[in-house]
Image: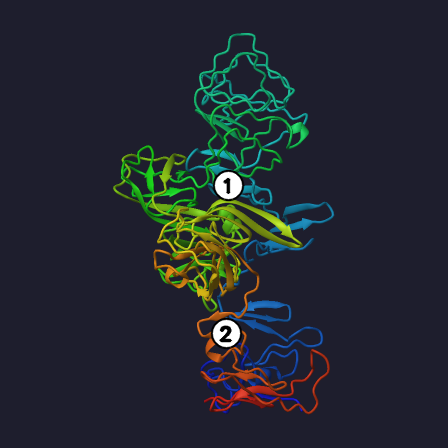
Amino acid sequence: MASTILVKRSTGTTVPSSLEFGELAITVGAGTQVNRGDRIFVGDNNTTVQVIGGKYFTDMLDHVHGTLTSDSAVITDNNSKVDRFRVDDVNIDANVIETDTTDTDLIFRANGTGKLVVEDSQELEFGTTGDIEFRFDEVDNVLRLDRVGVNTPELRLQDDLKIQFGTLGEGSIRYDETTTDKVRVEGADWQYDNGVQIYIADTTVSNSVSTGAVVIDGGLGVGGVAWLDELRVDDNAIIGTANTDTLTVNSETTFQANVTFNGTQTVSGTINQTGQFNLDNIRLDGNTISTNAGNQLILDPDPRNGDAAGDLVVRGNLQVAGTTTTVNSTQMTVNDPVFNLGDDVSEKVIKSSAVTGSTSLSIDNPSGIIVGSAISGTNIGTGRTISGISVTFSTSSGFSSSPSVGAAIYTKDGSVYEQIGTFISQTGSTVAVQLSSKSLRESSFYENLQLADGNTGTPQTVDIDPSVAAAQVFVTTLISIAGGGTIGALAEGDAVTITQGSDDGMDRGIAYTYLDGATTKIGFFGYDRTGSSNGTGAFTFIEDATNTNNIFTHVVGAVGTIAIEKNDLDEDSGTVIGGQANQTYTAQSATGGSGSGATLTVVRDGTGAISSVTVADGGTYYQDGDLLTVSGANIGGNSPTDDLEVRILSVSSSRGTVVMGTLELDEDLATPYGGTGRSEFNSKGILYGNGTGNLLETAAANMANPGVGPDVATSFQILTVTAGGVPVWTDTIDGGTFT
């Protein structure tokens, strides 16, 4: 049978103390306006109790339709009418609107931009006998103000009252008695149609812009020929309206101020320009070419023939101060026989001006710099170092629950976490982080990553989103300076030089991408900072690499092949081991490297020299480049003088049994290690915890008539727990009672 759901309920009239989101409750006590009886409640998404209905409200609807009834709702009749309507002090009955209180004004007011409308041919009459009639004559399409009586009334506007024209009162006429004592026309222009002449009888002679028969504070437009006895222009003058208009000056012309040309200028001589020169979106200022709009400057020697056409020649040195250089060429020739990778000197641009004595600077990005680096440049001073770096990332949002200041912040790439610093602050679209003593990669590396406030369990995450802040991953980068403040001011655009002062831990070499079937992989060859067991590094080649902040790693397995080394010194040392045929030392334990369990078979020839070393047991979790040591005392010599050292050249793909401490994955995974401790399970049972013991199971639900298909129409049983916390099945959900 179907399940029974009982909502929370009470015989009283009080509101439930709290309800979960979507949880229902009902009261059946007699309801009034001041209590909460006879009502239905539901919890909203803030667990706030909301009233959604009940008998108290339905009783208000139980009366004759169309009749205004006290203490009840208004219900219209079958003609959508009620017999009368009362609103506050206004009573509407039949065709009469009146106030209930004697000598009270009746006010008509439209809210906002609303209107009070009198329809066509309807009249507004003024006076006891209707002396003045105001109406719209639809036949003549005229708004009329008519004199009805025998008297001749005046239409009079007090001082400063306007007659306005236009939908929004764009034009107006008023008498300004207060300031000018003139009738003033304001807002819109006046137009006199063809045949209407303007004649001004005043003959006052003009000797300035403020005297004369006609005084115009603004411009004067003349569409035809203007005959002027003498032309004097003060302030601005525009001649012509189109680029085909011409101005011919037959006399010498002197310009005493700035001149602006908006059209095409043809100059046959030399132009000498002092100061800034703006050409469209290109700005020339001193020896700097920049844009004054957007963030891209394009140099195209031959735009007619596509992106690959033409030659751009740079004579002298080329310095690129940005963090990313993309070359789409298919062929590149460089005369220098040596590429220098991992330069420890970088140039950064100041993003905000700084006053003298500043101990904090805003730079363009944090890529390639770390705490402890030296900083130099104009007005920086000597002996200055970086004592701290903080970066504000552009993110899709802030953490839903703001971390504590100083809490660890990680980058998250899939399932890989890496701590980059500690939390400072956040906004709705940024997260500020105090970097730890490490170097960040270029900004593009982080565009598909997340920031996380933890590296275990289910931490909070936010997407690093450059689209939020003008396509910048690093919105701001602030560096703190130790050793004193700046000795002078720095302007936006100034450059500073940062010299690395400590180990950044990054590898150096060349990375490349390739397709292995449908899978994109990364290869690497170069200097691996941690390639050797003693941490001195080694030159390496990695076919299938993982790049984490310019540190390359790869999958490791058991020992495959090894090479003999002589203490990395390429010279013999130790005591003389006497010759003896068939000196074979089987399964000698080897120590060192990143794995464990490796044993080797060592064979000496008749002279005592080592003729072969083979792998008896490869062990587990060794890596390419690991250095293993076999005690000299176990192979016919002395320790440590005659110790044998071998280097792992490659590892096999076979891992064998995975061992993690006491955990072996070739057996059932026990509960203390995150497993179930079981290898078999009841059909349709559900697992639940049992402390450190094996997981327990419920019985299967007792379904007399299970549904058919993946989406059943009926719920047969529900999983709940007893008072002791044991999971059981039931067919009833009881919300309980409340008082």
* First of labels 2, 1 by sequence position: 1
Disc 1: which residue: 324
Do we see residue 415 in this rendering? no
- Numbered disc in front, either 2 or 1: 2
Quadrant including the N terminus: bottom right
Q: How far apart in space, not on screen, are marks 2 and 1 (Cα)?
A: 46 Å
Q: In this view, does 400 lie above or below 301?
A: below
Q: Which residue is drawn at 52% across and 13% down?
A: 270
- On the image, which quarter does residue 533 sit in? bottom left
Near-viewer residue (238 or 148): 238
Q: Which amino acid does label 1 sit on?
A: Thr
Q: Is residue 110 above or below residue 178?
A: below
Left or right placement of residue 592 versus residue 415 in this view = left
| Image position, residue 610 (x, y; %) | 46, 55
| Image position, residue 451 (x, y; %) | 47, 58
Density class for disc 1 (Cα within 10 Å; few <14, some 14-19, many ≥20) is: few
